[in-house]
Image (spheres, rainbow, N blue to C red):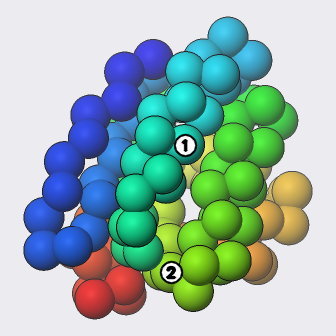
């Protein structure tokens, strides 16, 4: 898995490529935790190129969402493919974590 990070207009963007599973969850969690050590309060995950998401990946995403809620921040997931979107729907996380159809609409949601 590859994570590309950038910051623009006070929003931290993380683009995930590949698989977010038991093998890559620790790396993703470390990357996210290093961002959350700062006082960032707007976080956008771009899942356009995320091919697979396991329960270990869901745990990492839920942890980030909880931390953003704790600090009164804004958090959104964007551009989910059909498989990843189904994982969120089946798990029920889609009801508690904002999901946008595109990065542009995600930016609008947290701006």
Instruction: State whether residue 88 is above or below residue 31.
Output: below
Instruction: State whether residue 111 is above or below residue 24.
Output: below
Single out the residue that lies furthest toward the front.
Answer: 38
Image quarter for residue 95? bottom right
* Circle 1 residue: 33
Percent x, y of residue 81: 49, 48
Which sits earlier in the primary sequence, circle 1 or circle 2?
Answer: 1
Task: Identify the residue at horizontal 13%, vertical 74% (top origin).
Answer: 9
Left or right of 102, for residue 32: right
**Pick the front one: 17 or 27:** 27
Single out the residue that lies furthest toward the right.
Answer: 91
Task: Identify the residue at horizontal 60%, vertical 17% (top origin).
Answer: 24
Instruction: State whether residue 65 is above or below residue 6.
Output: below
Query: What kind of element bears circle 1?
Result: helix
Percent x, y of residue 26: 65, 22
**The N terminus: image quadrant:** top left
Left or right of 86, for residue 111: left
């Amino acid at each position: 898995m590859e994570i590309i990070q950038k910051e623009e207009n006070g929003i931290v963007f993380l683009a995930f490529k590949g698989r977010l599973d038991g093998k890559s969850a620790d790396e993703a969690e470390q990357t996210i935790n290093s961002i959350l050590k700062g006082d960032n309060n707007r976080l956008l995950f771009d899942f356009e190129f995320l091919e697979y998401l396991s329960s270990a990946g869901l745990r990492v995403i839920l942890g980030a969402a909880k931390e953003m809620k704790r600090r009164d921040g804004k958090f959104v997931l964007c551009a989910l493919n059909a498989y990843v979107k189904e994982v969120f729907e089946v798990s029920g996380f889609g009801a508690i974590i904002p999901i946008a159809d595109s990065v542009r609409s995600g930016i609008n949601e947290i701006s």
